[in-house]
Amino acid sequence: MLSPVTPITQEEYDFIRQFVYEKSRINLGPHKKELVMARLSKRLRALNLTTYKEYLTYLKDISHKEEITHLIDAISTNHTFFFRETIHFDFLTSVILPEFVKKAGGGMRTFRVWSAASSTGEEPYSIGIILSDYFLSHPHIQWALEGTDISTTALGAAKEGIFSEEKVKQLSSDIIDRYFKKCSETKEGFYQAKPPLRAKMNYRAQNLLKPPYPFHEPFDVIFCRNVMIYFDRQTQQELVSYLVPHLRSGGYLMIGHAESLAGISHTLKIVKPTIYRKE
Ligand SMILES: C[S@@+](CC[C@H](N)C(=O)[O-])C[C@H]1O[C@@H](n2cnc3c(N)ncnc32)[C@H](O)[C@@H]1O
């Protein structure tokens, strides 16, 4: 039988809230106690602990440094789905890619995209499907996609490119046939992205609030969607100032539909709500 976990006290919650903020800048706010308990109780059970007091002692022990990653993993919201916020994918296909191809002329070029909070991979794989399709008729152009996230569990899923049938069924049968294959009996009910698609992507752990970022070449597009929403204004400002130098001039930044750069100082030009361009 599973031992019950004692409810978190206000003091313990405040400690976790501050700790998570310092490590990830995720701002839990004062009213997420229930959510934190719901997400962390599994972790306590996995460690055979029954109180948050014991958990905090464990977390503060430097010989358990890896627990910070588990904590952030448990707290971060990884919710995502294929082709979420279609406006960005339509804009990519109808404006950004034709512009890039025109500028490249007949020359060999690489189109570079960064999915800056790639979560379990649905966003980067959606981008990858669009790029694979589009560049079929422009074979002189290569593409490369970097995916980063703070959650190593989410990144592991993205790297494998394995998705439940329920998620994949959001895609057309044509896309499923061309880009995914059913997993074997050991992983029944799951699909895996085919190797040529996976081969174009590179995933690594990166806390967006802990630059420098490991990239030496600028990106044509940065997708940084539905992550800023967890940060306070000052942190959003910092994040934007870290991201912009990684865009090439003429490159685009996409943010989530519930996010905005209003009130943040930056040098980008707004093209449409949630789409910005570096002039
Ligand atoms: C809601 S998901 C968004 C996924 C995808 N971009 C989308 O729009 O569907 C937010 C992601 O941001 C990641 N995240 C939160 N704080 C982060 C940080 N400081 N640095 C990097 N990633 C972070 C979480 O782990 C999570 O996977």
Image (cartoon, rainbow, N blue to C red):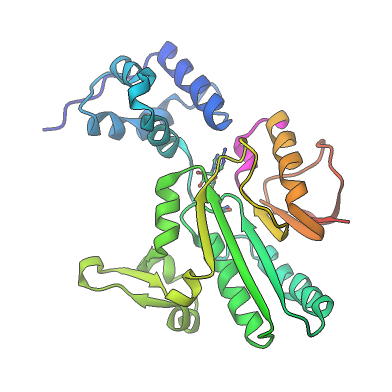
* x and y, in percent, of residue 57 in the image: 33, 16
Q: Is 95 contained in the magenta span? A: no
Outermost residue on the left side: it is 1
Which quadrant is home to the N terminus?
top left
* Residue at the (67%, 88%) spot, across then down: 137
183 relative position to 12: left or right? left
Please indicate, yes or no, whether residue 181 appears anywhere in the rendered image: yes
Query: For the view shown, which residue lies furthest in the bottom direction?
Result: 137
**Image point (74%, 68%), residue name:** 91
Say above or below: 133 vs 14: below
Placement of the C terminus among the 4 image quadrants? bottom right
Q: Quadrant of residue 55?
A: top left
Where does the image place residue 80, in percent across and percent down from the top left? 51, 54
For residue 59, what is the image quadrant? top left
In the visual, does 67 lie left or right of 100? left
The segment highlighted magenta reads 225-233
Residue 150: x and y in percent read 51, 42
Could you tell whether 68 is left or right of 213 in the image? left
**Position above or below: 79 against 242:** below
Q: Nearer the viewer, residue 215 or 228?
A: 215
- Total label count? 0
**Residue placed most toward the observer, 223 or 11:** 223
Residue 274 visible in the snapshot: no
Q: Is residue 10 above or below residue 198?
A: above
Is-magenta flag for residue 226? Answer: yes
